[in-house]
Amino acid sequence: MENSNFEILAVAYLRGELNEEGIQQLESLLEQHEEYRDTLKALESSWKGMDQFEVPEPSDRMDQQFFELLGREMEKAESPGKLTTSFKALLDWLFRPQLAYAMVFMAIGLGAGYVLTKNVQQQPGISVAAEEVTEVREKLVLTLLDQPSASKRLEGVSEINKITNVDATVITALLKTLNKDTNVNVRLAAIASLTNYVDNPTVRQGLIQSIPNQESPIIQVTLANLMLALEEKKSIAPFKQLLQEKELDTTVKKKIEETIASII
Amino acid sequence: MHQLTDNALMLKVKSGEVDKLGLLYERHKKRLFGFFYNLGNDPMTSEDLVQNVFIRMLKYKGSYAGDGSFMAWMFRTARNINYDYHKANKNNRNQTDVAAIAYKLEDDTSQFDNMDKEDTIVQLHRAMHSLPMEKREILILSKYKAMKFSEIGAVLGCSEGAAKVKAHRALNDLRNAFEKMQIQ
Protein backbone atom coordinates (compact mmCIF):
# COMPACT_ATOMS: atom_id res chain seq x y z
CA MET A 1 0.00 0.00 0.00
CA GLU A 2 2.79 2.36 1.01
CA ASN A 3 4.66 1.44 -2.11
CA SER A 4 1.80 2.32 -4.47
CA ASN A 5 1.26 5.52 -2.48
CA PHE A 6 4.87 6.34 -3.10
CA GLU A 7 4.50 5.50 -6.80
CA ILE A 8 1.53 7.81 -7.16
CA LEU A 9 3.12 10.65 -5.18
CA ALA A 10 6.45 10.32 -7.00
CA VAL A 11 4.81 10.64 -10.43
CA ALA A 12 2.80 13.66 -9.31
CA TYR A 13 5.98 15.18 -7.85
CA LEU A 14 7.90 14.68 -11.12
CA ARG A 15 5.10 16.36 -13.05
CA GLY A 16 5.16 19.24 -10.59
CA GLU A 17 1.57 18.58 -9.58
CA LEU A 18 1.97 17.93 -5.86
CA ASN A 19 0.14 20.25 -3.51
CA GLU A 20 1.43 21.07 -0.03
CA GLU A 21 -0.33 18.13 1.55
CA GLY A 22 1.11 15.78 -1.09
CA ILE A 23 4.60 17.13 -0.54
CA GLN A 24 4.30 16.46 3.18
CA GLN A 25 3.09 12.92 2.53
CA LEU A 26 5.99 12.28 0.16
CA GLU A 27 8.52 13.71 2.60
CA SER A 28 7.18 11.55 5.37
CA LEU A 29 7.49 8.45 3.15
CA LEU A 30 11.05 9.40 2.17
CA GLU A 31 11.98 9.74 5.85
CA GLN A 32 10.57 6.33 6.65
CA HIS A 33 12.10 4.58 3.64
CA GLU A 34 15.64 5.59 2.73
CA GLU A 35 15.51 3.42 -0.44
CA TYR A 36 12.62 5.55 -1.79
CA ARG A 37 14.92 8.57 -1.75
CA ASP A 38 17.44 6.83 -4.08
CA THR A 39 14.64 5.57 -6.31
CA LEU A 40 13.14 9.04 -6.62
CA LYS A 41 16.54 10.56 -7.45
CA ALA A 42 17.18 7.97 -10.19
CA LEU A 43 13.67 8.36 -11.59
CA GLU A 44 14.02 12.13 -11.64
CA SER A 45 17.20 11.85 -13.68
CA SER A 46 15.49 9.61 -16.31
CA TRP A 47 12.41 11.84 -16.26
CA LYS A 48 14.47 14.95 -16.97
CA GLY A 49 16.55 13.06 -19.54
CA MET A 50 13.38 12.40 -21.53
CA ASP A 51 13.02 16.16 -22.04
CA GLN A 52 16.18 16.00 -24.15
CA PHE A 53 14.63 13.65 -26.73
CA GLU A 54 14.53 15.63 -29.91
CA VAL A 55 11.52 15.49 -32.18
CA PRO A 56 11.96 16.86 -35.71
CA GLU A 57 9.46 19.35 -37.11
CA PRO A 58 6.81 17.77 -39.31
CA SER A 59 7.32 18.69 -42.97
CA ASP A 60 5.11 20.91 -45.16
CA ARG A 61 3.98 17.72 -46.88
CA MET A 62 1.92 16.85 -43.80
CA ASP A 63 0.08 20.20 -43.91
CA GLN A 64 -0.41 19.94 -47.65
CA GLN A 65 -1.91 16.46 -47.43
CA PHE A 66 -4.16 17.46 -44.56
CA PHE A 67 -5.49 20.60 -46.21
CA GLU A 68 -6.13 18.72 -49.45
CA LEU A 69 -8.14 16.23 -47.45
CA LEU A 70 -9.95 19.02 -45.62
CA GLY A 71 -10.71 20.81 -48.89
CA ARG A 72 -12.27 17.64 -50.30
CA GLU A 73 -14.30 17.06 -47.16
CA MET A 74 -15.50 20.68 -47.09
CA GLU A 75 -16.61 20.35 -50.67
CA LYS A 76 -18.56 17.22 -49.79
CA ALA A 77 -20.07 18.84 -46.70
CA GLU A 78 -21.35 21.91 -48.51
CA SER A 79 -24.60 21.64 -50.46
CA PRO A 80 -24.11 18.89 -53.05
CA GLY A 81 -21.90 20.02 -55.85
CA LYS A 82 -22.40 23.70 -54.99
CA LEU A 83 -18.88 24.84 -55.74
CA THR A 84 -18.39 22.62 -58.74
CA THR A 85 -21.72 23.66 -60.22
CA SER A 86 -21.00 27.33 -59.78
CA PHE A 87 -17.56 26.99 -61.38
CA LYS A 88 -19.02 25.02 -64.27
CA ALA A 89 -21.61 27.74 -64.73
CA LEU A 90 -18.82 30.32 -64.68
CA LEU A 91 -16.86 28.41 -67.31
CA ASP A 92 -19.93 27.98 -69.54
CA TRP A 93 -20.69 31.66 -69.16
CA LEU A 94 -17.18 32.73 -70.06
CA PHE A 95 -17.09 30.67 -73.20
CA ARG A 96 -20.37 31.89 -74.60
CA PRO A 97 -19.99 33.63 -77.95
CA GLN A 98 -21.46 36.89 -76.69
CA LEU A 99 -18.13 38.15 -75.38
CA ALA A 100 -19.42 41.70 -75.38
CA TYR A 101 -22.25 40.80 -72.97
CA ALA A 102 -19.81 38.96 -70.79
CA MET A 103 -17.57 41.99 -70.62
CA VAL A 104 -20.47 44.28 -69.75
CA PHE A 105 -21.59 41.97 -66.93
CA MET A 106 -18.08 41.69 -65.64
CA ALA A 107 -17.71 45.47 -65.63
CA ILE A 108 -21.02 45.90 -63.79
CA GLY A 109 -20.02 43.20 -61.30
CA LEU A 110 -16.64 44.70 -60.62
CA GLY A 111 -18.03 48.22 -60.34
CA ALA A 112 -20.85 47.16 -58.02
CA GLY A 113 -18.46 45.05 -55.96
CA TYR A 114 -16.11 47.96 -55.58
CA VAL A 115 -18.85 50.39 -54.55
CA LEU A 116 -20.46 47.92 -52.13
CA THR A 117 -17.16 46.97 -50.54
CA LYS A 118 -16.43 50.61 -49.87
CA ASN A 119 -19.66 50.89 -47.89
CA VAL A 120 -19.12 47.80 -45.78
CA GLN A 121 -17.91 48.62 -42.27
CA GLN A 122 -15.28 46.27 -40.83
CA GLN A 123 -16.40 44.51 -37.66
CA PRO A 124 -14.10 45.49 -34.78
CA GLY A 125 -12.59 43.02 -32.34
CA ILE A 126 -12.28 39.72 -34.12
CA SER A 127 -12.29 36.82 -31.70
CA VAL A 128 -9.38 34.43 -31.35
CA ALA A 129 -11.51 31.65 -32.82
CA ALA A 130 -12.23 33.77 -35.90
CA GLU A 131 -8.52 34.49 -36.26
CA GLU A 132 -7.79 30.78 -36.08
CA VAL A 133 -10.42 30.07 -38.74
CA THR A 134 -8.80 32.72 -40.94
CA GLU A 135 -5.37 31.19 -40.42
CA VAL A 136 -6.62 27.74 -41.40
CA ARG A 137 -8.47 29.11 -44.43
CA GLU A 138 -5.35 30.96 -45.53
CA LYS A 139 -3.33 27.76 -45.37
CA LEU A 140 -6.02 25.97 -47.33
CA VAL A 141 -6.02 28.76 -49.93
CA LEU A 142 -2.24 28.67 -50.36
CA THR A 143 -2.31 24.90 -50.77
CA LEU A 144 -5.16 25.05 -53.29
CA LEU A 145 -3.53 27.84 -55.33
CA ASP A 146 -0.50 25.58 -55.73
CA GLN A 147 -2.44 22.65 -57.14
CA PRO A 148 -1.88 21.53 -60.75
CA SER A 149 -5.64 21.30 -61.35
CA ALA A 150 -7.27 24.58 -62.49
CA SER A 151 -10.53 23.74 -60.74
CA LYS A 152 -8.64 23.36 -57.45
CA ARG A 153 -6.99 26.74 -58.00
CA LEU A 154 -10.41 28.27 -58.72
CA GLU A 155 -11.60 26.73 -55.50
CA GLY A 156 -8.64 28.36 -53.77
CA VAL A 157 -9.60 31.81 -55.06
CA SER A 158 -13.19 31.18 -54.01
CA GLU A 159 -12.02 30.29 -50.48
CA ILE A 160 -10.29 33.68 -50.25
CA ASN A 161 -13.66 35.40 -50.54
CA LYS A 162 -14.67 33.75 -47.26
CA ILE A 163 -11.76 35.34 -45.39
CA THR A 164 -12.56 38.61 -43.64
CA ASN A 165 -9.04 39.97 -43.29
CA VAL A 166 -6.55 38.49 -45.69
CA ASP A 167 -2.86 38.92 -44.94
CA ALA A 168 0.03 39.88 -47.22
CA THR A 169 0.87 36.24 -48.03
CA VAL A 170 -2.55 35.64 -49.55
CA ILE A 171 -2.44 38.94 -51.45
CA THR A 172 0.97 38.01 -52.86
CA ALA A 173 -0.36 34.57 -53.84
CA LEU A 174 -3.37 36.17 -55.57
CA LEU A 175 -1.17 38.60 -57.49
CA LYS A 176 1.12 35.73 -58.48
CA THR A 177 -1.95 33.85 -59.72
CA LEU A 178 -3.04 36.91 -61.69
CA ASN A 179 0.35 37.17 -63.39
CA LYS A 180 1.45 33.58 -63.71
CA ASP A 181 -1.56 31.28 -63.78
CA THR A 182 -1.89 29.48 -67.10
CA ASN A 183 -5.67 29.36 -66.92
CA VAL A 184 -7.61 32.47 -67.90
CA ASN A 185 -10.58 31.59 -65.68
CA VAL A 186 -8.36 31.35 -62.63
CA ARG A 187 -6.81 34.72 -63.51
CA LEU A 188 -10.29 36.25 -63.93
CA ALA A 189 -11.36 34.87 -60.56
CA ALA A 190 -8.16 36.32 -59.05
CA ILE A 191 -9.07 39.79 -60.39
CA ALA A 192 -12.60 39.48 -59.02
CA SER A 193 -11.18 38.56 -55.64
CA LEU A 194 -8.55 41.32 -55.70
CA THR A 195 -11.25 43.95 -56.29
CA ASN A 196 -12.27 43.38 -52.66
CA TYR A 197 -8.94 44.81 -51.55
CA VAL A 198 -8.39 47.71 -53.95
CA ASP A 199 -7.94 50.06 -51.01
CA ASN A 200 -4.74 48.19 -50.27
CA PRO A 201 -1.91 49.99 -52.15
CA THR A 202 -0.07 46.69 -52.82
CA VAL A 203 -3.16 45.30 -54.52
CA ARG A 204 -3.69 48.44 -56.59
CA GLN A 205 -0.03 48.51 -57.59
CA GLY A 206 -0.09 44.77 -58.38
CA LEU A 207 -3.15 45.15 -60.59
CA ILE A 208 -1.60 48.05 -62.49
CA GLN A 209 1.70 46.23 -62.95
CA SER A 210 -0.05 43.16 -64.31
CA ILE A 211 -1.70 45.10 -67.17
CA PRO A 212 1.19 44.79 -69.67
CA ASN A 213 1.66 41.10 -68.76
CA GLN A 214 -1.82 40.04 -69.79
CA GLU A 215 -2.36 38.49 -73.20
CA SER A 216 -5.95 37.33 -72.91
CA PRO A 217 -8.47 39.86 -74.35
CA ILE A 218 -11.04 39.20 -71.64
CA ILE A 219 -8.47 39.85 -68.91
CA GLN A 220 -7.30 43.02 -70.66
CA VAL A 221 -10.86 44.32 -70.91
CA THR A 222 -11.69 43.33 -67.34
CA LEU A 223 -8.66 45.23 -66.08
CA ALA A 224 -9.61 48.20 -68.24
CA ASN A 225 -13.12 48.22 -66.74
CA LEU A 226 -11.72 47.94 -63.24
CA MET A 227 -9.24 50.79 -63.73
CA LEU A 228 -12.06 52.88 -65.15
CA ALA A 229 -14.19 52.19 -62.07
CA LEU A 230 -11.24 53.10 -59.85
CA GLU A 231 -10.33 56.11 -62.02
CA GLU A 232 -6.75 54.98 -61.62
CA LYS A 233 -4.51 57.43 -63.48
CA LYS A 234 -1.41 55.33 -62.87
CA SER A 235 -2.85 52.68 -65.18
CA ILE A 236 -2.60 54.95 -68.22
CA ALA A 237 1.11 54.26 -68.84
CA PRO A 238 0.78 50.44 -68.73
CA PHE A 239 -2.31 50.63 -70.97
CA LYS A 240 -0.39 52.75 -73.45
CA GLN A 241 2.36 50.14 -73.32
CA LEU A 242 -0.25 47.48 -74.06
CA LEU A 243 -1.49 49.48 -77.05
CA GLN A 244 1.96 49.10 -78.62
CA GLU A 245 1.39 45.33 -78.86
CA LYS A 246 0.94 44.42 -82.52
CA GLU A 247 -1.28 41.43 -81.81
CA LEU A 248 -3.75 43.33 -79.65
CA ASP A 249 -7.37 42.49 -80.41
CA THR A 250 -9.08 45.40 -82.19
CA THR A 251 -12.09 45.38 -79.83
CA VAL A 252 -9.73 45.44 -76.87
CA LYS A 253 -7.67 48.20 -78.44
CA LYS A 254 -10.79 50.32 -78.82
CA LYS A 255 -11.86 49.60 -75.25
CA ILE A 256 -8.44 50.57 -73.86
CA GLU A 257 -8.37 53.79 -75.86
CA GLU A 258 -11.80 54.69 -74.50
CA THR A 259 -10.66 53.82 -70.98
CA ILE A 260 -7.56 56.01 -71.22
CA ALA A 261 -9.66 58.90 -72.58
CA SER A 262 -12.18 58.52 -69.72
CA ILE A 263 -9.54 58.33 -66.98
CA ILE A 264 -7.66 61.37 -68.24
CA MET B 1 -11.62 37.21 -26.32
CA HIS B 2 -13.17 33.81 -26.81
CA GLN B 3 -11.49 30.63 -27.89
CA LEU B 4 -13.58 27.61 -28.70
CA THR B 5 -12.66 24.52 -26.74
CA ASP B 6 -11.56 21.36 -28.53
CA ASN B 7 -14.83 19.74 -27.52
CA ALA B 8 -16.90 22.60 -28.95
CA LEU B 9 -14.91 22.49 -32.19
CA MET B 10 -15.33 18.73 -32.57
CA LEU B 11 -19.06 19.07 -32.00
CA LYS B 12 -19.13 21.68 -34.77
CA VAL B 13 -17.29 19.23 -37.04
CA LYS B 14 -19.92 16.65 -36.11
CA SER B 15 -22.72 19.06 -37.04
CA GLY B 16 -21.22 19.58 -40.50
CA GLU B 17 -18.76 22.46 -40.04
CA VAL B 18 -15.92 20.32 -41.36
CA ASP B 19 -13.55 23.32 -41.68
CA LYS B 20 -13.29 23.42 -37.87
CA LEU B 21 -11.24 20.23 -38.09
CA GLY B 22 -8.50 22.48 -39.46
CA LEU B 23 -8.32 24.29 -36.12
CA LEU B 24 -8.06 21.03 -34.24
CA TYR B 25 -5.33 19.93 -36.64
CA GLU B 26 -3.35 23.13 -36.07
CA ARG B 27 -3.70 22.80 -32.31
CA HIS B 28 -2.66 19.17 -32.06
CA LYS B 29 -0.57 18.26 -35.11
CA LYS B 30 2.80 18.70 -33.41
CA ARG B 31 1.77 16.83 -30.27
CA LEU B 32 0.43 13.92 -32.32
CA PHE B 33 3.49 13.90 -34.56
CA GLY B 34 5.73 13.78 -31.45
CA PHE B 35 3.62 10.97 -30.02
CA PHE B 36 4.07 8.78 -33.10
CA TYR B 37 7.72 9.71 -33.53
CA ASN B 38 8.61 8.97 -29.92
CA LEU B 39 6.83 5.65 -30.22
CA GLY B 40 9.54 4.74 -32.73
CA ASN B 41 8.02 5.61 -36.09
CA ASP B 42 10.15 7.39 -38.66
CA PRO B 43 9.16 11.01 -39.48
CA MET B 44 7.41 10.14 -42.76
CA THR B 45 5.33 7.38 -41.14
CA SER B 46 4.57 9.67 -38.18
CA GLU B 47 3.19 12.27 -40.59
CA ASP B 48 1.00 9.67 -42.29
CA LEU B 49 -0.27 8.43 -38.96
CA VAL B 50 -1.18 11.99 -37.89
CA GLN B 51 -3.19 12.25 -41.11
CA ASN B 52 -4.89 8.94 -40.32
CA VAL B 53 -5.97 10.24 -36.91
CA PHE B 54 -7.88 13.09 -38.56
CA ILE B 55 -9.33 10.81 -41.23
CA ARG B 56 -10.61 8.56 -38.47
CA MET B 57 -11.99 11.56 -36.56
CA LEU B 58 -14.01 12.47 -39.63
CA LYS B 59 -15.14 8.89 -40.11
CA TYR B 60 -16.35 8.54 -36.54
CA LYS B 61 -17.44 12.14 -35.92
CA GLY B 62 -21.04 10.92 -35.63
CA SER B 63 -20.20 8.90 -32.54
CA TYR B 64 -18.45 11.81 -30.79
CA ALA B 65 -20.54 12.57 -27.72
CA GLY B 66 -18.56 15.56 -26.44
CA ASP B 67 -19.07 14.61 -22.81
CA GLY B 68 -15.51 13.43 -22.14
CA SER B 69 -12.08 14.87 -22.82
CA PHE B 70 -11.28 15.54 -26.47
CA MET B 71 -7.58 14.93 -25.82
CA ALA B 72 -8.34 11.50 -24.36
CA TRP B 73 -10.51 10.65 -27.37
CA MET B 74 -7.84 11.90 -29.79
CA PHE B 75 -5.01 9.94 -28.17
CA ARG B 76 -7.15 6.82 -27.87
CA THR B 77 -7.68 7.11 -31.63
CA ALA B 78 -3.95 7.74 -32.15
CA ARG B 79 -3.06 4.73 -30.04
CA ASN B 80 -5.40 2.47 -32.03
CA ILE B 81 -3.97 3.78 -35.29
CA ASN B 82 -0.45 3.04 -34.14
CA TYR B 83 -1.45 -0.51 -33.15
CA ASP B 84 -3.22 -1.08 -36.47
CA TYR B 85 -0.22 0.22 -38.39
CA HIS B 86 2.27 -2.00 -36.58
CA LYS B 87 -0.02 -5.00 -36.80
CA ALA B 88 -0.23 -4.55 -40.56
CA ASN B 89 3.53 -3.97 -40.86
CA LYS B 90 4.85 -6.46 -38.36
CA ASN B 91 7.08 -8.08 -40.97
CA ASN B 92 8.88 -4.82 -41.62
CA ARG B 93 12.10 -4.01 -39.91
CA ASN B 94 11.71 -2.78 -36.37
CA GLN B 95 11.49 0.98 -36.72
CA THR B 96 12.74 1.60 -33.21
CA ASP B 97 16.29 0.73 -34.23
CA VAL B 98 16.08 2.99 -37.26
CA ALA B 99 14.83 5.88 -35.17
CA ALA B 100 17.59 5.36 -32.63
CA ILE B 101 20.25 5.25 -35.35
CA ALA B 102 18.84 8.34 -37.04
CA TYR B 103 18.86 10.10 -33.73
CA LYS B 104 22.48 9.15 -33.14
CA LEU B 105 23.51 10.32 -36.60
CA GLU B 106 21.91 13.70 -36.00
CA ASP B 107 23.89 13.97 -32.82
CA ASP B 108 27.22 13.35 -34.53
CA THR B 109 27.48 17.04 -35.28
CA SER B 110 27.46 17.90 -31.59
CA GLN B 111 30.46 19.37 -29.83
CA PHE B 112 32.99 17.02 -28.26
CA ASP B 113 32.44 18.76 -24.93
CA ASN B 114 28.87 17.55 -24.93
CA MET B 115 29.82 14.03 -25.95
CA ASP B 116 29.09 12.40 -22.58
CA LYS B 117 25.79 14.16 -22.18
CA GLU B 118 24.78 13.35 -25.73
CA ASP B 119 25.76 9.70 -25.27
CA THR B 120 23.66 9.54 -22.16
CA ILE B 121 20.65 10.90 -24.01
CA VAL B 122 21.20 8.47 -26.91
CA GLN B 123 21.38 5.59 -24.45
CA LEU B 124 18.27 6.77 -22.65
CA HIS B 125 16.54 6.98 -26.01
CA ARG B 126 17.61 3.45 -26.85
CA ALA B 127 16.46 2.30 -23.43
CA MET B 128 13.09 3.91 -24.11
CA HIS B 129 12.76 1.98 -27.35
CA SER B 130 13.61 -1.30 -25.66
CA LEU B 131 10.44 -0.95 -23.57
CA PRO B 132 7.16 -2.52 -24.64
CA MET B 133 4.85 -0.21 -26.59
CA GLU B 134 2.34 0.36 -23.77
CA LYS B 135 5.10 1.53 -21.43
CA ARG B 136 6.41 3.94 -24.05
CA GLU B 137 2.88 5.24 -24.57
CA ILE B 138 2.32 6.06 -20.94
CA LEU B 139 5.72 7.70 -20.59
CA ILE B 140 5.10 9.91 -23.61
CA LEU B 141 1.60 10.83 -22.47
CA SER B 142 2.83 11.56 -18.92
CA LYS B 143 5.21 14.12 -20.37
CA TYR B 144 2.37 16.21 -21.83
CA LYS B 145 1.62 18.89 -19.28
CA ALA B 146 -1.62 19.65 -21.08
CA MET B 147 -2.93 16.19 -20.22
CA LYS B 148 -4.28 15.40 -16.78
CA PHE B 149 -3.73 11.93 -15.39
CA SER B 150 -7.48 11.37 -15.44
CA GLU B 151 -7.28 11.88 -19.23
CA ILE B 152 -4.29 9.56 -19.54
CA GLY B 153 -6.30 7.00 -17.60
CA ALA B 154 -9.17 7.48 -20.09
CA VAL B 155 -6.75 6.84 -22.99
CA LEU B 156 -5.45 3.66 -21.39
CA GLY B 157 -8.81 2.51 -20.09
CA CYS B 158 -7.94 2.64 -16.38
CA SER B 159 -8.39 4.89 -13.34
CA GLU B 160 -6.31 7.97 -12.63
CA GLY B 161 -4.49 6.25 -9.76
CA ALA B 162 -3.79 3.16 -11.85
CA ALA B 163 -2.42 5.39 -14.64
CA LYS B 164 -0.02 7.02 -12.16
CA VAL B 165 1.17 3.65 -10.90
CA LYS B 166 1.66 2.47 -14.50
CA ALA B 167 3.63 5.63 -15.30
CA HIS B 168 5.83 5.13 -12.26
CA ARG B 169 6.55 1.52 -13.18
CA ALA B 170 7.26 2.39 -16.80
CA LEU B 171 9.71 5.05 -15.64
CA ASN B 172 11.30 2.53 -13.33
CA ASP B 173 11.69 0.10 -16.22
CA LEU B 174 13.21 2.86 -18.30
CA ARG B 175 15.76 3.55 -15.57
CA ASN B 176 16.60 -0.19 -15.28
CA ALA B 177 16.98 -0.58 -19.06
CA PHE B 178 19.19 2.52 -19.14
CA GLU B 179 21.41 1.25 -16.30
CA LYS B 180 21.74 -2.12 -18.03
CA MET B 181 22.94 -0.38 -21.20
CA GLN B 182 25.52 1.62 -19.27
CA ILE B 183 27.00 -1.58 -17.83
CA GLN B 184 27.27 -3.18 -21.29
Image: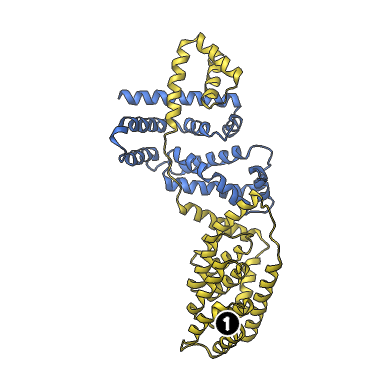
Chain colours: A yellow, B blue
> Which residue, as the protein is rendered here, is positioned at the far top?
A32
Q: Nearer the viewer, residue A81 or A195?
A: A195
Left/right of residue A201 with respect to residue B175 in the rendered view: right
The image quarter in which residue B18 lies:
bottom right
Instruction: Give the x, y percent position of residue A22.
Output: 59, 18
Against B143, residue A41 (above or below) is above
Left/right of residue A82 with respect to residue A202 in the rendered view: right
Against A64, residue A223 (above or below) is below
Q: Nearer the viewer, residue A11 or A212?
A: A212
Secondary structure at badge 1 equals helix
Instruction: Give the x, y percent position of residue A258.
Output: 60, 88
x 58%, y 54%: residue: A136
x 53%, y 62%: residue: A144
Asked whether residue B87 appears in the rendered view, the answer is no
Asked whether residue B17 appears in the rendered view, the answer is yes
Identify the amino acid type marked 1: Val
Against A180, residue B159 (above or below) is above
Q: Which residue is mark 1?
A: A221
x 60%, y 19%: residue: A20
Q: Nearer the viewer, residue A44 or A214?
A: A214
Q: Residues within 10 Å of mark 1 (few under 14, many from 20)?
A: many
The image quarter in which residue A115 lies:
bottom right
For mark 1, name the chain: A
